[in-house]
Amino acid sequence: MGYNLSPQFAQMVTYKFDVQGRQALTQDTFIQSCVMLKGLTDALKQRDPQMQGRIQLNYEDFMTMAVFNKV
């Protein structure tokens, strides 16, 4: 999606979406996690046109991003 993510982040996403406790994602949960990450990435890209991976948000902007990108 254009940004590098750490292995720790990938493990956290797997943990979050692993509803069966197998330390793996089903096809459905993989798609669900990708949809969430894509939505958040698109919101970040709007505020980070040079794709540096950093933005400044106030609390309300953060909450707006979270609410509109809820899976």
Image: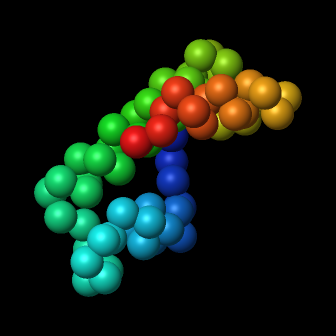
**Which image quarter holds the C terminus?**
top left
**Nearer to us in this view, 50 or 37:** 37
Residue located 52% across and 63% down the image: 9
> Quarter of the image holding residue 34?
top left
Residue 2 visible, this orientation: no
Q: Name the residue at 29% across, 47% down.
A: 32
Q: Residue furthest left?
A: 27
Q: Position of residue 17 (x, y in %)?
A: 36, 63
Q: Position of residue 31 (x, y in %)?
A: 24, 47
Residue at left offset 18%, top offset 54%: 28
Q: Is residue 28 above or below residue 14?
A: above
Residue situated in front as seen by the camera: 40 or 64: 64
Report the quarter where the N terminus lies: top left
Q: Is residue 64 visible?
A: yes
Could you tell whether 66 is left or right of 18 in the image?
right
Above-or-below relation of 36 to 25: above
Q: Depth check: 69 or 46 in front?
A: 69
60 vs 3: above or below: above
Which quarter of the figure has residue 66?
A: top right
Task: Determine whether 23 is above or below 3 in the image.
Answer: below
| Farthest-out residue, bottom | 22
Residue at left 32%, top 70%? Answer: 18
Side of 59 relative to 16 (left or right): right
